[in-house]
């Protein structure tokens, strides 16, 4: 099945590329496009991207990932997408925190990447549910720093050991997406 993702930013795009894309291929899915739309563009430009993907690019399903932490409630987010929420070829996944919390959901992969860095690991607590973290980006930045290149390299290293089975048990939003993808 040809699928595309409309996401809110770089972390979202990198999670799909590094942690999901290969697993999706193994299960017969072909990721054609990952479109990052920043800020309010996720609502303003989403309709045109969805229509373009479904009608012109022969995409069979579009997944929209949107962070809830910026908005008052799930109902508000769903209402902003209007008719898209009723389209059977569009799946809106509301991420309770940030997708950065998805990377943190596999603590064992993080531990493997940081082997020998006990000081760093002591500053991060293992959360059964990474949606309970107040600021996932801040926790992630404790691992290696705030520089974009370093963060991207770290995400790639985590992805090599990332286990979707472990991670889905620690993050309900990730679990919802994986269920929708049939993984």
Image (cartoon, rainbow, N blue to C red):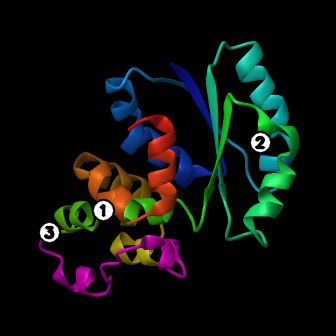
Q: Are marks 1 and 2 in contact (CB under 8 Å)?
A: no
Q: The residue tagged with tag 3: helix, strand or loop?
A: loop
Q: Which mark is residue 85?
A: 2
Distance between the alpha carbons at the discs numbered 2 and 3:
43 Å
**On the rendered structure, is 67 left or right of 128?**
right
**On the rendered structure, is 130 left or right of 34?**
left
Whole-percent x, y for residue 167 in the image: 34, 58
In which image quadrant can residue 116 be found?
bottom left
Q: Residue at x 37, y 54 (%)?
A: 155
Q: Residue at x 20, y 68 (%)?
A: 111
In which image quadrant can residue 68 be found?
bottom right
Residue beneath label 1, please? Answer: 106
Q: Which mark is residue 115?
A: 3
**On the rendered structure, is 111 left or right of 126?**
left
Q: Is residue 128 above or below residue 155?
A: below
Instruction: Mark 1 or mark 2: name the one nearer the start of the chain.
Output: 2
Distance between the alpha carbons at the discs numbered 1 and 3:
14 Å
Residue 110 within the segment the image draws in magenta: no
Question: Mark 1 or mark 3: which is in front?
Answer: 1
Q: Residue at x 44, y 23 (%)?
A: 29
Q: Is residue 142 above or below residue 96?
A: below
């Amino acid at each position: 099945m040809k699928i595309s993702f409309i996401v809110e930013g770089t972390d979202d795009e990198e999670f799909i590329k590094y942690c999901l894309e290969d697993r999706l291929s193994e299960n017969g899915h072909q990721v054609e496009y990952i479109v990052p739309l920043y800020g309010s563009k996720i609502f303003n430009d989403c309709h045109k991207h969805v229509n373009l993907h479904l009608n012109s690019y022969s995409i069979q399903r579009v997944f929209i990932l949107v962070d809830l932490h910026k908005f008052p409630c799930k109902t508000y987010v769903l209402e902003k997408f209007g008719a898209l929420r009723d389209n059977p070829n569009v799946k809106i996944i509301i991420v309770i925190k940030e997708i950065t919390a998805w990377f943190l959901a596999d603590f064992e992969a993080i531990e493997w990447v940081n082997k020998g860095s006990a000081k760093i690991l002591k500053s991060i607590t293992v959360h059964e549910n990474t949606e309970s973290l107040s600021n996932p980006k801040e926790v992630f930045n404790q691992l290696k720093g705030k520089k974009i290149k370093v963060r991207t390299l770290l995400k790639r290293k985590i992805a090599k050991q990332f286990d979707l089975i472990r991670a889905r048990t620690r993050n309900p939003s990730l679990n919802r997406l994986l269920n929708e993808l049939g993984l």
